[in-house]
Image (spheres, rainbow, N blue to C red):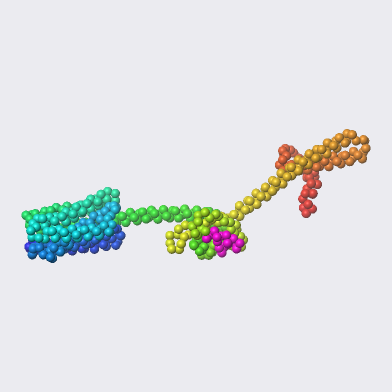
Amino acid sequence: MRPDTVLVTSYAVQALLAGSYGAAFWGFWRLYRQRYLRDWAFAWAVFALYAAAEGSAYWLAMVASESGERALFSILSITTGLVYAMLLLRGALGLAGRPRPSRRLIFWGIAASAAVALVIVTWTAPQSVSRTVRLTLRVGLVTGVVGACAVASGGLAWIAGRSQEWFGLRLTGAVLMLLGVREAIGGQLLIFISTARVLAPMLTVFDAIIVPVVGSAMAVSLIVTERGRARAAAAEAERAEAALRQSEARLRSIIEGTSDVIVTLNAHGVIEFAGPSVRRVLGWSVEEVTGHSAFDFVHPADVQPAAEAFARIRKGERSVPAVEIRLRAKDGTWRLVEALAQVRPAGDDDGPMIVLNARDLSERVELEARLLQAQKLESIGQLAGGVAHDFNNILTSILGHVSMARLGAPRDPQLHAELDDIQRSADRAAELTRQLLAFSRKQILKPERSDLSDLVASTGQLMRRTLGEHVI
C-alpha cells in the first residue's frame, strides 16, 4: 500500500473515531450534566473535522501543488486544530474546578483562529516559500499548540486527582499528556523532509492507534470519576436527608409539646397547617381547621383588629405587635389568646407563608383576677388595721375615763352598774379591735392553748353580726 494511501486512511480512521467519541461524551454530558463533558464532546467533534481536513490537505498536496482546495482544507485544518486545543483546555479547567473561559471568549478565539489560519495559508501559498517554512507554519505551529494544551489539560486532571476520584482523573491526565507529547513531537519531526518521508506514515498510523486509546481511556476513567462523584453525592444526599428527618422530628416534637396554637396561613388567611395543640386549647381537630379561613374562628368584635394586623404582616412589616383576640372553641365558648404572626418565604408560587402563634391567656386572666382579689383583700386589711388602731386609741381613752370615774364616783350601786356596762362594752370593743388587727396581720400573734368552746362562745356574737342571718 502506498504511503499516501496509508496516511489518508489513518486520518479517516481518526476522524471516524473522534466523531464517535464526541457523540459518546455528549451522551455522558446528558447523563451527568457536567459542563466539562460538554466541552470535550465539542472538542472531539472538532478533532474529527481537524483529522478530516488534515488528511484532505495532505492528499491534495500529494496529487497537486498549491490549489484553492488545498488552501481551503489547510485553513480548515489550522482553525479546527486551534479550536480543538481551546475546547480541550476549557474542559480540563472545568474538570479541575477552575474558572472556565466564557462563551464569548471562545467565540472570539474561534474567529482569531480562522484569521490566523487565513494569514498563514495566504503567506505560505506562493511557490517561492520553501516547504520547510510551509510545514513549520501549517503543521508545526498547530501541533505545537495542540500538544501544549493537551499536556496542560492532562496536568490539570492529574492535579485534581489528588483530592478526589484519583484513579479516573489520574488516568485521564496521563492519556492527555501522552497525546500532547505525541502531537508536539510528531508535528515538529514532520517539518524536516528527511524525517517526514520516513516517520510520517509511522506517526500517522501511531495516531490511528493512540486516538482510540486516549478516547477509550478518557471515557472509561471519566465514567469511573462520575460514578464516584455520584456515589459521593448520594451519600451526601443521604446524610442531608437524615439531617432533615432529624430536624423535622425535632421540630415536630417542639410543635407537639408546646401549649401554644401554631398554624400557618397563606396570603388569603386560609389555614394550611395546624399543630396538635389546637385540640388541647380549642378542642378542634387538625382536620377540622385545615382549609378554613382563620377569621372563621375569630370573635366578630375582634375580626377588624385581627384583619388590620394580618394586612400589615402580609405587606412585610416586622414591627406588628401582638393582638389579643377571642377564638371560638369547639364547645362554643370563647378563649382569649395573644396572637403573634410573622412572614416566612414559602419557596413556591403561592406567595409568602404566615406563621401564627396564639397563646392561651385564660390562665393568665384567672391569675390576674386572683391577684386583683388578693390586692383588694390586702387593701381591706390595711384599712381595717388603720381603723383598728384609731378605734383602739379611742377605747383606751374611754377605758381610762371609766377607771377615773369609778374612783371618784359615790357609792351608788346604780352608777357603778352603769360603769360596769361601759367597762364590758369597752372590753368587747377592744376584743373586736384585736380581731381586726389579727385579720390585717398587724398584731403579733402569740400561739397559746385555748378552749375551742369558749373561743366560739366569745366570738359567737361577732359571727352572728358579720355573717348575717342567711348562714345558720
Task: Give the extent of the magenta segment.
Answer: 295-311
Q: Residue at x 79, y 46 (%)?
A: 462
Main structural element of the magenta stretch: helix, strand or loop? helix
Q: Is residue 295 visible?
A: yes
Residue lying farthest to the bottom in this orientation: 69
Q: Is residue 224 left or right of residue 331?
A: left
Question: Residue 307: within the magenta?
Answer: yes
Q: Residue at x 59, y 60 (%)?
A: 302
- Looking at the picture, how far across and down is residue 347, in whole percent? 43, 60
Total numbered badges shown on the rendered structure? 0
Question: Residue 297: within the magenta?
Answer: yes
Q: Is residue 7 visible?
A: no
Where is the N terminus found, in terms of image quarters? bottom left
- Looking at the picture, how far across and down is residue 323, in whole percent? 57, 56
- Looking at the picture, how far across and down is residue 69, in whole percent? 13, 65
The answer to whether 470 is drawn above or below residue 433 in the figure is below
In depth, the one of 234 and 118 nearer the eye is 118
The answer to whether 112 is drawn above or below residue 382 in the figure is below
Q: Residue at x 85, y 37 (%)?
A: 401
